[in-house]
Image: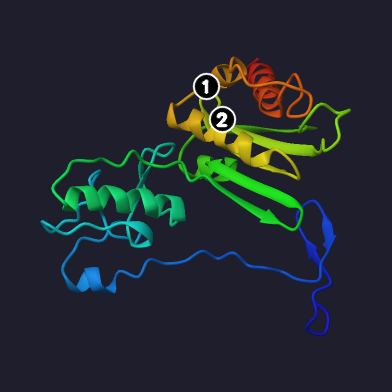
Amino acid sequence: IDSLRVREVVTQDHVLPADIIIFGIGGRPNVALAEAAGIRIGTTGAIAVDVEQRTSIPNIWAAGAVAEVFHLALQKHTYVPLATTANKQGRIAGINAAGGLARFGGVVGTAVVKTFDLTIAHTGLTQKYAQYAGFDADAVLIKASSRAYYMQGSQPIHVKLVYEKRSQRVLGAQMIGKDGVAKRIDVVAAALKSAWTLRDIVNLDLSYAPPFAPVWDPLLVAANAAIRQAFYRAN
């Protein structure tokens, strides 16, 4: 920062010119009303709920940005205040409050954002967070084409695939590119929901046509690279 103006961002590996810096510091659930009512607050600071969105007090349900959620990759409750999560939890809470029976299936924290012409997406765990959570995690980073390289609209896409070393279970993914990112992050989200391994992803029968994807989809390239990496590092 020079004379109150940003000039550059210095990371461990690069120096990047910059005019603006945006800090994404997250948020905190507003649970003052719940605390006043004596409702149990979870370790995350959000309201503790069960699979039916019930709180610790009978006939009171909680959903959305004030409630904890069960994370399928972590296998524990955490705080993921996303609009998709809020809508699903709200539906579950409403059904049960009206006398029905519905259960929330958990999340993997899938999110996507458009920044200028780039699409940035995430699902599951980052490598750093997976290691922090106790997983013996590794990751592979690849660059591929979003479509057949000779097709109009084909763009580079970067895929980072996180996995558990011994079991090769997929733990998460992060992707960035100008084309085809959202489609592929959703495939990994489905894989996380089913606790798939790298080989499960490699064996996926994904759609192919040059205007939409290369013969070897970037996600398959990443999974194959991860399998090779896991083999060589284990031997």
Kind of residue sitting beneath label 2: Tyr
When the figure is inspected, residue 222 is found, relative to residue 186, above or below; the finding is above
- Is 131 placed left or right of 64 in the picture? right
Mark 1, Cα crowd under 10 Å, few <14 / some 14-19 / many 20+, is some
Q: Are marks 2 and 1 in contact (CB under 8 Å)?
A: yes
Secondary structure category for the residue under label 1: loop
Density class for disc 2 (Cα within 10 Å; few <14, some 14-19, many ≥20) is: many
Horizontal placement of 45 versus 212: left or right?
A: left
Q: How far is disc 2 from disc 1 in space, using C-alphas?
A: 8 Å
Q: In this view, does 45 lie to the left or right of 8?
A: left
Mark number for residue 197?
1
The residue located at (43%, 53%) in the rendering is 80
Label 2 sits on residue:
163
Instruction: Name, please, the residue furthest toward the left.
Output: 58
The kind of residue on which mark 1 rests is Thr
Q: Position of residue 24 (x, y in %)?
A: 59, 64
Color encoding of the figure: rainbow
Percent across and percent down for residue 151 are 85, 30
Picture layout, residue 14 above or below residue 214: below
Tell me: residue 19, above or below residue 14. Answer: below
Q: Is residue 198 visible?
A: yes
Q: For the point 71% across and 25% down, which residue is it?
A: 217
Dot 2 or dot 1: first in sequence order is: 2
The residue lying toward the viewer, choosing from 234 and 192, is 192
The residue at the point 35 percent across, 70 percent down is 30
User: Please, what secondary structure does the residue beneath circle 2 have?
Assistant: strand
